[in-house]
Amino acid sequence: MKEILATLDEAAKIVPALRVATLALHMLLNTSLEPDWEDIKSESASLVSYATIATFLAAVQSQIIALTYQDNTSHVAVASNALGFAGVLFDVSSACFALGASTTLQRHTTIIDSEINAIDDASPRQLVQLDLAEPLNSYGASDVWVRIYKKVEKRMRILRMENQSQNLQEDETSIIDRPPLLRATQASWKEVQGALAVGNAASNLMILGVLCFFGSVICLAVSTQPRTVWIVSVVVTAWVIFAVLTASVLLAAKWFWKS
């Protein structure tokens, strides 16, 4: 899937008309073209919301299953039960993954933030020893690395203004030893990337759970209710799906025109 999105991104650079479709696809798959650090940190709260919604859906789906699990007299009833059980599994899995990813994100984004903020009080030796030759090399890391560079440049300007870094290679005895900067950032960033992947999986599982929920409700209406009732159910479901797709395309078009 990542390879497909990358190919579409490259194609969108050549054919501008593809940019709207590419943005819409990224949104529907719950991905971002290039998230910044604040977006990554806020993802923790979003994952908690996903877990809450998934738990609610699992509870509602369980109530439907309680009404239908003994009725397997028709193919439609069997389909309703199958979709119901599948929806519960998707929703429970989504809630577990989302909570785990949220906890990991919150812990490791805090570690990275604290290490980046420590640059504000860095000594000249720490700045000299800081290796910026190989930045974080993964999806979404560019904004973090830009922040690190800006912090380093700002700290060096302050030190020069205070005449403390005219020569950064000072005598060792004139500087108090401090621990190296960004010691845990590389390791924590790998944890963040893993948590983001799990979070994306959780959101996709929740989408599958929602689709199973709608399918189960429609099958239940078809098998137990008059034609008018299940036709209304199908129309409402189709309208909801259409509204979501339309909103995604419109929002993608808005991003396109802004860019």
Image (spheres, rainbow, N blue to C red):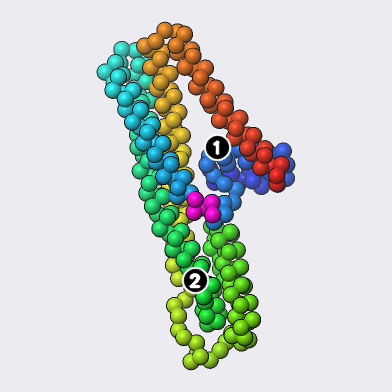
Report x, y in % for residue 195. 43, 52
Crowd band around label 1 with a 10 angstrom C-alpha radius: few (<14), some (14–19), many (20+): some
Which element type, helix, strand or loop, lies under badge 2?
helix
Look at the image and say whether residue 39 sits in the magenta stretch: yes
Residue placed under numbered mark 2 in the picture: 118
> In this view of the protein, can residue 86 be seen by the observer?
no
Q: Which residues are magenta?
A: 38-42
Residue at the location (67% across, 37% down)?
253
Q: Nearer the viewer, residue 229 or 158?
A: 158
Report x, y in % for residue 156. 61, 77
Residue placed under numbered mark 1 in the picture: 28
Which element type, helix, strand or loop, lies under badge 1?
helix
Q: Amino acid at mark 1?
A: Leu
Residue at the location (53% across, 72% down)?
119
Report x, y in % for residue 148. 56, 67
Look at the image and say whether residue 187 sits in the magenta stretch: no
Residue at the location (52% across, 80% down)?
123
Residue at the location (64% across, 46% down)?
9
Q: Is residue 259 above or below residue 108?
A: above
Q: Is residue 8 above or below residue 167?
A: above
Pointers 2 and 1 in contact (C-beta within 8 Å):
no
Report the side of 20 relative to 224 (left or right).
Answer: right
Q: Amino acid at mark 2?
A: Ala
